[in-house]
Image (cartoon, rainbow, N blue to C red):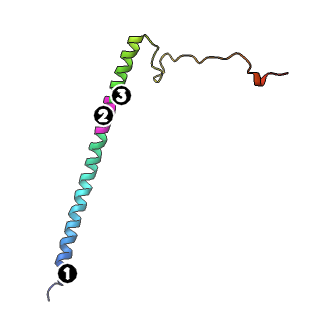
Amino acid sequence: MGTPSWAIPVGVLAGLCVICLAFVWWFIPRLYTRGMQADMNRFAAEKAERERRAASLQEAHGGTGDVEAGLAVPEKPVFKYTPPAYTAY
């Protein structure tokens, strides 16, 4: 008694599916990790460039420290008057 006529094509298709699944399971994490590392490197380079520009502008204009970093934050103005809408009569 022989095998049914559909057994070989189904077996080949199942083998191809397993090979494709194994390839995707191996390749996608590598691709994702490589992309994330490239993004982090690009962001670090852009941040370094922004910090370099900010330092050169600050040095050229003699400004205060970096507000975002919390260095020499300028004081907020204090208003010492009563607005007319709240004046008691």
Nearer the observer, 41 or 78: 78
- Check if mark 3's residue and mark 1's residue have beta carbons within 8 Å: no
Instruction: Quadrant for the C terminus, please.
Output: top right
The amino acid beneath tag 1 is Trp
Q: In this view, does 42 lie to the left or right of 66?
A: left
> Which residue: 47% across, 18% down?
71
SS at badge 2: helix
The answer to whether residue 73 is above or below residue 21 is above
- Residue extending farthest to the front is 84
Q: What residue type is labelled 3?
A: Lys
Locate residue 41: give its quadrant. Answer: top left
Residue occupying the point 67% across, 17% down: 79
Is residue 24 left or right of 84 when viewed as pictured? left
Task: Provide the residue designation for mark 2.
Answer: 42
The first of marks 3 and 2 along the sequence is: 2
Q: Mark 3 points at which residue?
A: 47
Q: Residue at x 19, y 74 (%)?
A: 11
Position of residue 26 measured from the top left corner of the image (x, y, whole percent): 24, 54
How much space separates mark 3 and mark 2, taking CA atoms? 9 Å
Secondary element under disc 1, as helix, strand or loop, is loop
Rendered image quadrant of residue 65:
top left
Magenta range is 38-45
The amino acid type, in three-letter code, at marker 2 is: Arg
Pinpoint residue 83: horizontal percent, then vertical percent.
Answer: 73, 21
The residue sitting at the right extreme is 89
Count neighbours of disc 2 (C-alpha within 10 A) and say few if under 14, some if 14 to 19, many if 20 or more. Answer: few
Residue matched to label 1: 6
